Amino acid sequence: MRKAEIINGRIVNVVLVDPEKVPEWCADWPDAGNAGPGWLVLPDGSFAPEVPFLSRDEAIGQIVSMIDHTALQITGLVPEVERLSWIAKEQAARTHIEGRGTDALLLNEAVATGESADELARKIVKNADRYRAAVSRMTGLRRAAIADLDSRDAGVVIEELQHELAAIVQAG
């Protein structure tokens, strides 16, 4: 069995012990598994390899890139011209659902896809609401992660953000 000595959130020493005769001085140390000195301790108690030093600007760039990638996982590949129409499409869909008229933007897409305007409007509003919820969560995570860079290891901040972003994608 390999036991890990932890100081300040990092493994500083790993000792090999007989699982049947663990010395008292390391009995409360966690099992190191395959981790080694320099590995980071994550909030859930698991270990991650030490991440090379990142400057604040590099860490912020990585955080922004991770969020962009997450947004792409949520939306899929969509042409920019279509993304630019999302606000107008949402407004047109909500207006249609409220019975205040049907915009040509909504009608033209419905005709092209063979859906009714009602069906398309419901899909657009559902997607808009889900996307808005994901974006607000990602925005909060980005702001919190950047603030955390002032007091925490960038590698740990980025590792935690990866877990949070994966949860957003899984929630769909």
Image (spheres, rainbow, N blue to C red):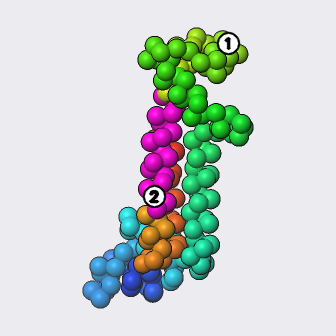
**Residue 91 x/y as whole percent:** 52, 28
Could you tell me which quadrant the N terminus lies in? Answer: bottom left
Given residues 89 and 32, the one toward you in this image is 89
Q: Position of residue 85 (x, y in %)?
A: 64, 33
Image spot of residue 82 (x, y percent) = 68, 34
Q: Does the magenta segment cover residue 148?
A: no
Task: Check disc 1 and give the amino acid type.
Answer: Val
Residue 41 visible to an observer of this rendering = yes
Look at the numbered disc 1 and give the secondary structure of its residue: helix
Q: Which amino acid type is marked by label 2?
A: Leu
Q: Residue at x 29, y 88 (%)?
A: 25
Which residue range is magenta in the image? 126-143
Q: Under tag 2, what secondary structure? A: helix
Image quadrant where residue 49 sits: bottom right
Q: Is residue 70 above or below residue 125?
A: below
Q: Quick one: label 1, few (<14), some, or many (20+) residues within 10 Å?
A: few
Instruction: Report if residue 172 is visible in the image.
Output: no
Nearest to the observer: residue 126 or residue 84:
84
Looking at the picture, does residue 4 appear above or below residue 59? below
Q: Which residue is disc 1 drawn over?
A: 111
Point out which mark residue 141 bears. 2
